[in-house]
Image (cartoon, grey):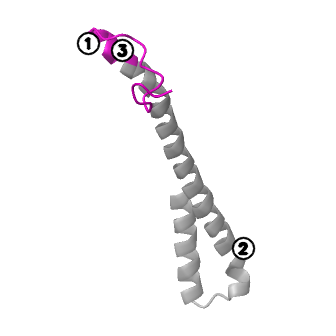
Amino acid sequence: MVLLGLVIGAVSLVLGAQGWELVRLWLYLLGSAMLVLVGTQLILSWIVIQVLEELSRRPDMASDDLQAAGAPATAPTNLGATEGAV
């Protein structure tokens, strides 16, 4: 979508340089901007989904690593507490 928007924008720019009035080109320019923005949003959303998917797999991977090393499968729940604190 981003590439299509850039192509439409470039064609509109060339047509504008050849003498076409802005009144004839505004819809193409608007569509071009919309395609670039929607395409960028889709790319960013895909990246966020990939990061969240990887983060959701991390506890399972850590558990598997701990079991392979012979450590207990569950980690302590009070990691921030000091010993002897009430």
Q: Residue 13 lies in magenta, yes or no?
A: no
Can you give x and y, in whole percent of width and height, for residue 51 in the image?
Answer: 47, 39
Q: Which residue is mark 2?
A: 27
Q: Residue at x 52, y 50 (%)?
A: 43
Query: In which quarter of the view is residue 60 placed?
Result: top left
Of label 3 and label 1, which has the lower sequence position? Answer: 3
Q: Nearer the viewer, mark 3 or mark 1?
A: 1
The residue located at (52%, 74%) in the rendering is 10
Q: Is residue 16 left or right of residue 81?
A: right
Q: Give coordinates of residue 38: x percent, y percent.
A: 62, 57
Q: Residue at x 59, y 86 (%)?
A: 16
Where residue 33 sits, quadrant-wise, is: bottom right
Residues shaded magenta: 63-86
Q: Which residue is mark 3?
A: 64
The residue type indicated by label 3 comes to Asp
Amino acid found under the numbered disc labelled 1: Ala
Between 35 and 37, the residue placed more toward the observer is: 37
